[in-house]
Amino acid sequence: MSFTIDYDPREEAANAQAAIYDDLNPAQQEAVLATDGPVLVLAGAGTGKTRVLTTRLAYLLQSNHAFPGQILAVTFTNKAAQEMKERISTLMGGVPVEGWWLGTFHSLAARMLRQHAPLVGLESNYTILDADDQVRLCKQLLEEHQIDPKKNPPRGVSDNISSWKDKGKNPTDVNPNEVGDFADGKMLTLYTQYQQRLKILNACDFGDLLLHMTTILKDPKNATVLDDYHRRFKYVLVDEYQDTNVAQYLWLRLLAKGSNNICCVGDDDQSIYGWRGAEVDNILRFEKDFAGAKVVRLEQNYRSTGHILAAANGVIDNNADRLGKNLFTTEEVGEKVRVRGFWDGPAEARWVGEEVESLQGKGLRLNDMAVLVRTGFQMREFEERFIQLGLSYRVIGGPRFYERKEIRDALAYLRVVAQENDDLALERIINTPKRGIGGTTVKNLYKHARSKNISLYQSILDLSQTDELKPKIKGTLMKLIDDFERWKSLVSTLHHAELASTILDDSGYNEMWKLDKAPDAPGRLENLKELVSAMSDFESLQEFLEHIALVLENQNNSSNDSITLMTLHAAKGLEFKTVFLVGWEEGLFPSQRSMDENGQKGLEEERRLAYVGITRAREKSYISYVANRRIYGSWVNSIPSRFVDELPEEHIDLATDTGMAQMGRTSHWDSSGFDAKVSGRNLDLSQKATTDGEFTNGMRVFHDKFGNGTIIHIDGSKLDINFDHAGAKRVMDSFVSKA
């Protein structure tokens, strides 16, 4: 007996193709199978965007729509690129993916530029400068123009140049009106000469990789280059499209014009990096940029419970500039988002610590919990509380508070004041800020100290009486010693927190960070203010320094199971079973600085940040705010963030600290603290403005701090006012009067 077997290779290929996407939901499958024309995949938080992107790439290959070399797949980070390569290889049965056009914007642009460098005056073996090299080159240019580098730091020059490059602007593209006064108004000249110097060095910086390639691709004289890439790339895939800057956007548009088969995956509701050049408008205008674009919304969330998603939706719905989507889950509704109000910051930190211990007692690991803050200075209070409770913690996105450079530097000054023989502390700050005291001088000081068995401090005093030190060095060292002697004399008469502030000012340390134009410099200044504020809790300088020593010892002994503490920005892309969102007060979150500098766009980015924070939680989400918060040593009265008011009531569990009066989200505090009028009862003032007619939209009012302004929105007892000189602010009605 014989058997015949019908074998159809086309059927086997079709089955293999179906196998890679048959377990995707309908919207995900639609995104994978939409192979013709431009596609925008609006992927909400936790909806499986990475899976969709990698499955789409694998499908294009398995279905013979393209060969590996015909697909350009772009990510933002090397980590994301590596993850995509591993997933693609797995989906394709282990095939190697090295050599594919899959990588970050900069790595792919660099690969292209190697082939076309002569078109922008470079050789193919050009060098890519790192950040330090860029700053050194800017320093040379400042010196040549005799521009004061202290008032105009080289890093500031480098940052300005990078900002122009992120916007796709060569020196000839910069409008002289946007140059400003920095670097004596010569920034455009410095940029021009910076680029000329790079060509002499046969080098470019990271910004040049995209800028040069965009310049090449859009130049009509290089039409054949662009045509070649259009023939090469049948498909362009882009991850995190909402985070692209102008230069990245221009580069992508030029490359996608050939086939028009560009697929961008992103979430306009998670665009939170405007401060570093990202343009949310890139994703918002996708349908205008690419005619006939198909928009696929991924709205089924696989991370969070129903109440958490509904709370996030309720907040983000208040943004006007968004394409719109509504996250949902088929899983359980879960617990409501717990919203808590407290009298002050310490009470908030105590509550978080107690909740963490309670969850631990129920079997939840610390690794599954996170505390998310708006800005770095908020971390200290929670770090202190965790240390008191013996809870191990980790800080993501930077060192722990007392391990940060600026804090260790400040502590070194204080340690020398408290004990002049602390050689390690003195060595740390002897040339910080820079005083022209180099390593050779320090080595000679130590050599004398060891020969006489004395401290570094005493060695300076000894050698200052001889001619062994150069006169300029001797004068600088004696000035430092005189400062320390003066600061030591103030220990008994000046409060130690005030003394610390005096030292940071007199030493030039605060000024050093004020002049530093690095993006993290303002945060370092905030941390220094928070350090001074923290000292107020201790009786003396010695007691404070002993506390710090114990804190650092506890930190060094931390275990692997640790609660995570980080900023909201650092949390993007992460998830935890339980998330504490703290400090939701107007002015802190949303950030007043962001609103002052960017107006409505700034507010909407802050709201997107709130959305990102809420959607980090899988099972439990806590949101808290306080009536009084000590910021940089001063107590500030607060009102709940407008984002708290935007949380849908049916999805939250609202309560307040038992140590204070009951308050609703629209509670009213005056300048002395919680208003006695609401003491002992839960008072909702949401109808106040309309019932007594005291304030109306368009009314002119006066505020003691901000002056005259016009009411533009009334939200219960909170007024949004456009002040004549201070811009838009949200204030309590008790602080204003009719003009």
Image: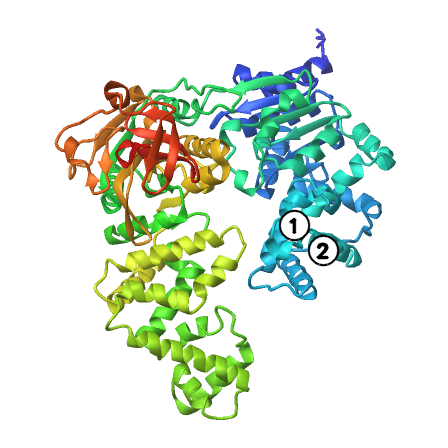
Q: Is residue 351 left or right of residue 268?
A: left
Q: Residue furthest front?
A: 739
Contact, CB < 8 Å: mark 1 with mark 2?
A: yes
Q: Nearer the viewer, residue 396 or 610?
A: 610
Badge 1 amino acid? Ile
Where residue 423 sits: x, y (%)?
A: 40, 77
* Mark 1, other Cα within 10 Å: few <14 / some 14–19 / many ≥20: many
Residue 550 circle label = none
Where residue 132 sits: x, y (%)?
A: 62, 59
441 vs 384: above or below: below
Residue at 74% in and 31% down: 254
SS class of the residue under badge 2?
Answer: helix
Asked whether residue 128 is in view, the answer is no
Asked whether residue 19 is in view, the answer is yes
* Mark 2, other Cα within 10 Å: few <14 / some 14–19 / many ≥20: some
Residue at 46% in and 83% down: 446
Q: Earlier in the sequence, mark 1 or mark 2?
A: 1
Badge 2 amino acid? Tyr
Where residue 90 sits: x, y (%)?
A: 60, 32
Report the quarter where the C terminus lies: top left
Residue at 64% in and 54% down: 185
Structural distance between the alpha carbons of marks 1 and 2: 9 Å
Q: Residue furthest left?
A: 680
Task: Place residue 85 in its image quadrant.
Answer: top right
Residue 194 circle label = 2
Counting the numbered discs, the total is: 2
Residue at 83% in and 32% down: 228
Q: In this view, does 176 lie to the left or right of 363?
A: right
Q: Nearer the viewer, residue 577 or 626?
A: 626
447 vs 271: above or below: below
Residue 161 circle label = 1
